[in-house]
């Protein structure tokens, strides 16, 4: 079987490449292979490769402040990418695939916590990332419609904040953990003060990159329902996360200062109860080990990081 992975040069794509151990032909695509925003390019690529399945990871993605500052491109780019991929997957008779969402799609003021898969469209997402969130909501809607009309098994996975080796450590666009690791490293290296954004009260759930890659393989191999699946693990406050990283990196806590800055949604707790009902023996990497592995990888690969 031939399986293509869009976003194959990103964090999860590269983790998938590390862990796969089967007889399938996996083809990892990057932006060098095709501009997924252009339908004709996507069509030509699929016509040449003729894949049987897809893992769709590619997206215009970034941390909180990239979403705040670029709402138009975060919506428009991702709508084009996702619509093109779905249209061409259907054209070339791809029956099954994984499509990656995000917990930012959930409502900012939900009716209950923890949120589950039934609540994706319950009310508006948080305005700090509404462009990206609505583009992902529309992909979930279209995956369901392709199932209704064409019986395609296009499975949407909803990961929480992903982190780990191969992450984007760019100080401008990074998500919270890689951005904080890089800024703390610079603070230690230069003996500067470290400024934590906001009070650190916001709660976030985190999932180690290799754990999510393993989930993708398990679900693609064995899951045959057309229902979205939340993929989540630990929840901690940003303040607690900062303290864990301070201990790992060995920073003087007197150098930590707080500055007033938008913290985004303060809480978006979701449940992995559906996933665990399907895969009760799945072993998660706890956040202390995951943070240590990530920082060690950051140090060992510093010269070749996405930064």
Image: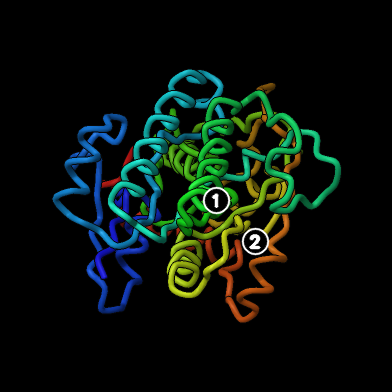
Mark 2, residue position: 233
Furthest-left residue in this view: 48
Mark drawn on residue 170: none
Residue 159: where, in percent of width, then height? Answer: 56, 52
Left or right of residue 32, residue 99 in this image: right
For label 2, the SS is loop
Q: Quadrant of the N terminus?
A: bottom left
Furthest-front residue in this view: 149
Q: Quadrant of residue 128?
A: top right
Residue 20 visible in the shown view: yes
Residue 117: where, in percent of width, then height? Answer: 69, 53
Q: CA distance from mark 1 to mark 2?
A: 31 Å
Mark 1, residue position: 148
Residue 193 visible in the shown view: no
The earlier-in-sequence mark between 1 and 2 is: 1
Furthest-right residue in this view: 111
Residue 140: where, in percent of width, then height? Answer: 55, 44
Q: Look at the picture and state if 140 lies above or below 217.
A: above
For label 1, the SS is helix
Q: Residue at x 36, y 48 (%)?
A: 90
Closer to the camera, 227 or 108?
Answer: 227
């Amino acid at each position: 079987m031939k399986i293509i992975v869009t976003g194959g040069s990103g964090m999860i794509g590269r983790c998938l490449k590390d862990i796969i151990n089967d007889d399938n032909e996996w083809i990892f695509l990057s932006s060098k292979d095709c501009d997924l925003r252009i339908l004709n390019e996507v069509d030509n690529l699929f016509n040449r490769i003729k894949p049987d399945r897809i893992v769709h990871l590619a997206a215009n993605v970034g941390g909180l402040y990239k979403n705040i500052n670029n709402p138009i491109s975060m919506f428009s780019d991702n709508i084009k990418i996702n619509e093109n991929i779905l249209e061409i997957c259907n054209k070339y008779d791809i029956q099954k695939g994984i499509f990656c969402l995000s917990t930012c799609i959930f409502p900012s003021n939900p009716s209950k916590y923890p949120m589950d898969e039934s609540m994706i469209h319950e009310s508006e997402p948080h305005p700090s990332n509404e462009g990206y969130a609505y583009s992902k909501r529309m992909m979930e809607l279209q995956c369901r419609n392709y199932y209704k009309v064409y019986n395609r098994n296009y499975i949407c996975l909803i990961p929480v904040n992903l982190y780990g080796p191969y992450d984007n450590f760019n100080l401008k666009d990074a998500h919270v953990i890689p951005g904080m690791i890089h800024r703390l490293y610079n603070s230690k290296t230069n003996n500067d003060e470290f400024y934590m954004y906001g009070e650190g009260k916001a709660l976030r759930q985190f999932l180690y990159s290799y754990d999510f890659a393993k989930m993708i393989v398990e679900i693609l191999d064995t899951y045959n329902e057309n229902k979205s699946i939340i993929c989540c693990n630990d929840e901690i406050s940003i303040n607690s996360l900062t303290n864990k990283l301070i201990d790992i990196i060995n920073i003087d806590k007197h150098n930590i200062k707080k500055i007033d800055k938008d913290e985004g949604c303060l809480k978006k707790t979701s449940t992995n109860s559906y996933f665990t009902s399907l895969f009760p023996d799945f072993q998660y990497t706890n956040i202390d080990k995951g943070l240590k592995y990530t920082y060690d990888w950051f140090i060992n690969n510093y010269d070749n990081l996405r930064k």
